[in-house]
Amino acid sequence: MIDSSFSKERNQVYSEIPYFYPDLEKEEYALLDIHVQTKEYWEKVRQAAREVGLIFEKIAPLLRTLEDSTLLQLGFPKETLAYIKVKSFPQEYIIGRLDFVINGSSIKLLEFNADTPTFIKETFHANSFICSHFNLENPNEECRQLLHMEMRKAIASSWAALNKPGTPKIVFTSHDDHIEDKWTTRYLQEQLDLPSEYVSLDNLRIVTDDVTEDGDILQAGLYTPLGERIDILYRQTYPVEHLVNDKDPISGDDVGQALMKLVEQGHLSILNPPSAFLLQSKAVQALIWGLHEEQNFFTDSEHAIIHQYFLPTYLEPDVFIERQKPFVKKPCFGREGDTVEIFNGLGDLTMEETMKTYSDTLPIFQEFCPLPVSNITTTKGTKEAHLMVGCFLINKSAGAIGIRAGSEITNNESYFLPVGIQRKDREDD
């Protein structure tokens, strides 16, 4: 039953957040509810994120040394092999998000979205409004400053890598007709607080070779509609695995691959950087687990981190079937639960996501770790939901935290559940 007074209250609270999207595709997305834990609890999540981040930092240089044949076996499209080996500045990624399943004291990593994580405006910005509404302390209070600082550092590193005089032309881009992508991108643009421009993806122009137009020489590069050559492109929400297949609707040219070529040739710097996509494949977790089992790459302390936070992950399901352990089959570049399947210890399919967009993508097989269940408050009443905790990594530093609440397979119908810090008087009860 829909509670009209509660719906009105929710609408009022979320209307105070500028350029937000409490509803997506006319369905409730952001909850007027809050998941409350102690400050120590949230710090343990951030500690897990920092320590897991160390493992990905360790594996990235190794990935760049692998043969192309091995990278193909890890699911990387052949068109990206040169691109992912580009390393022109220190940061491996600027904004990444780790997704955890937390049961009691156990914190396990499900995946690392190192390249194009969303959920940014929700956790870094909107969460504070909901904490204020419930009169609770915001565990993400100081994260906005971290985001600003690291974005500035990334721009400085990108500009230094291009080795050009003057000041950079910075452009933020996304699909203009996708509200979540657009306002996430515009929010990041605000946080940078440097001269920049927003240009929708379809209005960018690629020049692959120096050309003469109207008597002027256009150098190879990426251009705005007004003909300004872009130095740094921030494309937070547009995945490389989609970009690689982009074609010009009129000429049929491979514009996505041409854009990556500009990065490879040093005509353009792009954020998140190519190394972020290198860490995006879930098959990297299979590589990490394999090296952990072989005991010949990581230090003792790194092995301890992997043992504590990582789930056994392989490129084949044989180990789980032999041991009769439930497992999950995931596409290495899948998103929003798309094409995910859950199997029991006998190898029988027990649950699957109806969307099968990534059925042709290399799968990985990961030990099944059930998401905890909790009641959430929606405009249609109380519901039981599975909770997945996301924690951002902002260039090695743990950032904002948020929860996706939904089905056992977290998909694009999941809710945004804000988080808060338990008050001391409640802790003492």
Image (cartoon, rainbow, N blue to C red):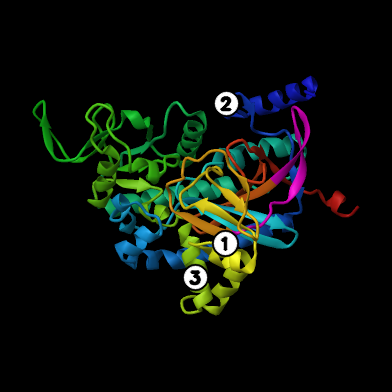
- The boundaries of the magenta stretch are 367-386
- In the displayed structure, would residue 187 be above or below residue 177? below
Quick one: label 3, few (<14), some, or many (20+) residues within 10 Å? some
Q: Name the kind of residue labelled 3 in the image.
A: Gly
Tag shown at residue 25: 2
Q: Name the kind of residue labelled 1 in the image.
A: Arg
Q: Are marks 3 and 2 in contact (CB under 8 Å)?
A: no
| Mark in front: 2 vs 1 | 2
User: In the depicted view, which residue is nearer to us: 110 or 137?
Assistant: 110
- Which residue is rendered at x = 34% and y = 66% of the image? 66
Which element type, helix, strand or loop, lies under badge 3? Answer: helix
- Is 323 included in the stretch rendered in magenta? no
Main SS type for the magenta part? Answer: strand
- Which residue is rendered at x = 38% and y = 41% of the image? 242
Q: Earlier in the sequence, mark 1 or mark 3?
A: 1
User: What residue does disc 1 label?
Assistant: 50
The image quarter containing residue 220 is top left
- Which residue is rendered at x = 39% and y = 45% of the image? 241
Q: Quadrant of the N terminus?
A: top right
Q: CA distance from mark 3 to mark 2?
A: 41 Å
User: What residue does disc 3 label?
Assistant: 290
**Left or right side of 402 for 246:** left
The image quarter containing residue 198 is top left
Q: Name the kind of residue labelled 2 in the image.
A: Glu
Which element type, helix, strand or loop, lies under badge 2? Answer: loop
Q: Position of residue 190 (x, y in %)?
A: 48, 36
Q: CA distance from mark 2 to mark 1?
A: 35 Å
Q: CA distance from mark 1 to mark 3?
A: 21 Å
Q: Earlier in the sequence, mark 2 or mark 1?
A: 2
